[in-house]
Image (tube, rainbow, N blue to C red):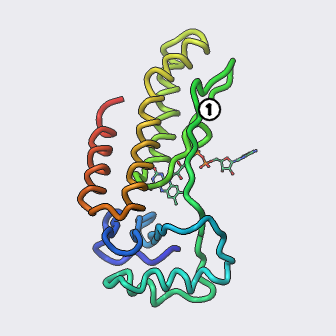
Amino acid sequence: MFVPRPPGVESRHYFLGGPVKVGWTPVSATQMYLFVVERTERRVRPPEELPGALADLLKPYGGHVAAFRESIGPDTEIAYRPLESFDLPGPWHRGRVILIGDAAHPTTPQLASGAGIAVEDALVLAEELARHRTVRETFGAYSARHEQRCRFVVDSSIEIGRLEQQQAPPAAQTAVVERALARLVEPI
Ligand SMILES: Cc1cc2nc3c(=O)[nH]c(=O)nc-3n(C[C@H](O)[C@H](O)[C@H](O)COP(=O)(O)OP(=O)(O)OC[C@H]3O[C@@H](n4cnc5c(N)ncnc54)[C@H](O)[C@@H]3O)c2cc1C
């Protein structure tokens, strides 16, 4: 759900160690979205249940989260989805067609890098297009340079999600995040 961005909030935050994972991501100078990740059976909550269910999940939390909980009402827009990823075996190209972004490597959002890696796909592909004379060479060079990095984002996100579901100690969860982000800042 979207919430007003309080003064002083400059970056993504998440809170581990409680019954669910709660966090927020600023998306503009005035707004951010609040997210909650819960482990459930595979089921669909009807939309009218969502405000009450979200308020219940946020009950144990204080600070800004408690204030956001107070603002939840029947008209609050809540996006509710299962988290899914998909391992598409390579190659991600055939003939003159190549898949990039989520079409090739959809990921759960734990590392918050799906869009980042999708933009990288486009940049790396553009660089390789400029370097090579044929589509075949371009796609081969792109795959050699970027496919493993995309798989690394998907695999790391799944690993973080697995630790969340096991309610592993927060330090163990953030260690995977930090290790992954440290690798992602390296040059491609
Ligand atoms: C809850 C959540 C939080 C996330 N947070 C982050 C984050 O903080 N940082 C980050 O980097 N990533 C994040 N991501 C991941 C990010 O949103 C995706 O990785 C990214 O949007 C993928 O971009 P894409 O262009 O490949 O695909 P999409 O954004 O899915 O774009 C595909 C587009 O194609 C359109 N389309 C589909 N079928 C057709 C058709 N037949 N004809 C024409 N158009 C069609 C769709 O409508 C859509 O507009 C998050 C994802 C989720 C679910």
Residue at coordinates 69% horizontally, 18% vertically from top-left? 95
Say above or below: 164 vs 104. below
Answer yes or no: disc 1 within 8 Å of ligand 1.
Answer: no
Which of these two is toward me, 142 or 155?
155
Question: Identity of the amino acid at label 1?
Answer: Leu
Say above or below: 5 vs 12. below
Residue at coordinates 65% horizontally, 75% vertically from top-left? 45
Which of these two is toward me, 43 or 153?
43
Locate residue 82: give its quadrant: bottom right
**Residue 177 horizontal/vertical position (percent):** 31, 51
Locate residue 161: give its quadrant: bottom left
Position of 177 with respect to 153 (left or right) is left
Q: List the single residue furthest toward the top.
A: 133
Secondary structure beneath disc 1? loop
At label 1, counting other C-alpha atoms closer than 10 Å, the crowd grade (few under 14, some 14-19, many 20 or more) is few
**Residue 131 horizontal/vertical position (percent):** 48, 14
Which of these two is toward me, 153 or 131?
153
Residue at numbered disc 1: 99
Residue at coordinates 36% horizontally, 29% vertically from top-left? 188
Residue at coordinates 60% horizontally, 27% vertically from top-left? 92
Position of 52 with respect to 70 (left or right) is right
**Residue 12 horizontal/vertical position (percent):** 35, 63
Which of these two is toward me, 7 or 139?
139
